Image: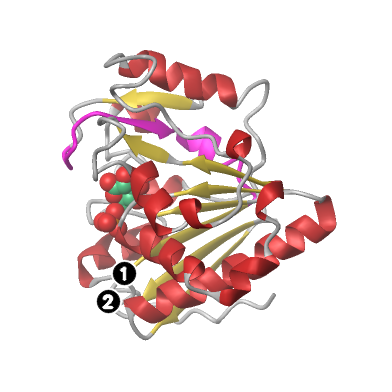
Amino acid sequence: MSKTEVVVYENPDLLAAAAAARLVTRLVDVQAAKGSASVVLTGGGTGIAILRELRDSSARDAIDWSRLDVYWGDERFVPADSDERNEKQAREALLDHVPLDPKRVHAMAPSDGEFGDDVDAAAAAYAEILTPEVPAFDIMLLGLGGEGHTASIFPDSPAVHEKERSVVAVRDCPKPPPTRISLTLPAIRRAQDIWLVTGGDAKADAVAQALAGAGEVEIPVAGARGSRRTLWLLDRGSASKLTKVYQPPTG
Ligand SMILES: O=C1O[C@H](COP(=O)(O)O)[C@@H](O)[C@H](O)[C@H]1O
């Protein structure tokens, strides 16, 4: 049965450094066991800070980057050179600094890419990459918003009600930019390990509601559960409204 665990770090810097260290360990273990590994990246402040920490850590060389598949949980549908793009931020923070196999880096299309501004076509093309069956991703990093969104699945939006497709176009997002591409909750739940990474007081209500059993329509992050493990990596701010005392996970 899948486990849900929570670790609270003193501050956001420690959270990012510890998550980067944890990522090295888990990816190395998975590569040793299976030969290769897959990771799904998130945008957002904490997600990108983790990648920066990994870049700056000498332990990053323990990962065989040529045997790593990289995906994204969501993307802002903006031009390729926009600073808002999750892929661009991830490349600057880490991906351009490690010897990945470019064929194994699976980015979502930008709004000036091969599908132009057709966000539905761009989403369908990403779904095609995930066929015939959405991979059982080894690790999926996800951030969250103060209103409870995760990836680009916002409360009570069409995306949160999607049951069939693995990837959807998202329009009219309350958080800019308004047009995005996102994995859906059924695709997210294919991941073996989901790490929910977030810091700051502004996330405290959403974290507390999700961990208290809120419904995924109102608090989409509540629906992000890994098939093996769901691990919340928080700082004191984002954990400040938790009432239950969580034990640190083993392993
Ligand atoms: O727009 C997005 O925001 C969320 C959370 O970002 P944060 O900076 O508030 O932590 C992120 O999870 C998502 O990937 C991104 O597209």
Q: Amino acid at mark 2?
A: Gly
Read off the magenta span.
Answer: 174-192
Check disc 1 and report its element: helix, strand or loop.
loop
Q: Position of residue 128 (x, y in %)?
A: 56, 19
Task: State the residue position of label 1.
Answer: 199
Q: Nearer the viewer, residue 207 or 115?
A: 115
Q: Position of residue 144 (x, y in %)?
A: 33, 54
Asked if disc 2 is less than 8 Å from ligand 1, the answer is: no
Q: Earlier in the sequence, mark 2 or mark 1?
A: 1
Residue drawn at the location 45% of the way across and 59% of the way down: 196
Residue drawn at the location 24% of the way across and 39% of the way down: 82
Q: Which of the 4 quarters of the picture holds residue 130?
A: top right
Task: State the residue position of label 2.
Answer: 237
Can residue 131 be found in the magenta stretch?
no
Q: Amino acid at mark 1?
A: Gly
- The reply, left or right, for residue 217 in relation to residue 5 is left
- The reply, left or right, for residue 136 in relation to residue 43 is right
Calculate the distance from the C-alpha at mark 2 to the C-alpha at mark 1. 6 Å
Residue drawn at the location 25% of the way across and 71% of the way down: 200
The circle on residue 154 is: none
Asked if disc 1 is less than 8 Å from ligand 1, the answer is: yes
